[in-house]
Image (cartoon, helix red, strand yellow):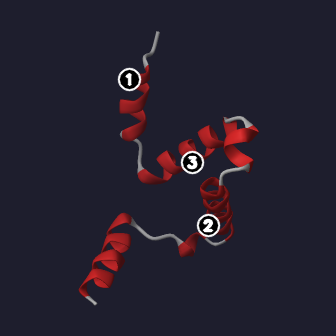
Amino acid sequence: MTTFSTIETLALKLPENQRAVLAARILDSLPALFQENDEGLAEAKKRDAELDRCPALALSLEEFDAKIHGRRAQ
């Protein structure tokens, strides 16, 4: 039987976009209690839908880090 640790290790080795899809599918599988009443999840789902409509909005981790570091320098 596959253990949580094995699944986690394999999942973290996936490319970034595949990890994001997997994470979204796992979140979608949770009971409504964790989806409908959580503002953070609602925001994440809204942004996920925006990225589905316009993938050009996505930032790589490097681009995101550069934006964060740029704000700190100001």
Task: Point out which mark residue 51 bears.
Answer: 2
How far separated are the C-alphas under marks 2 and 1? 30 Å
Mark nearer the N terminus (2 vs 1): 1
Mark nearer the N terminus (1 vs 3): 1
Q: In the current view of this chain or complex, which residue is farthest to the left?
A: 73
How far separated are the C-alphas under marks 3 and 2? 12 Å
According to the image, label 1 marks what residue? 6
Graded by Cα atoms within 10 Å as few (under 14), some (14 to 19) or many (20 or more), the crowding at tag 2 reads few
Residue appearing at x 37%, y 24% in the figure:
5
Q: Between 19 and 68, which is closer to the camera in this rendering?
A: 68
* Circles 3 and 2: CB atoms closer than 8 Å: no
Residue kind at label 3, given as amino acid type: Val
The answer to whether 16 is drawn above or below residue 10 in the figure is below
* Circles 2 and 1: CB atoms closer than 8 Å: no
Residue 24 horizontal side relative to residue 1, left or right: right
Mark nearer the N terminus (3 vs 2): 3
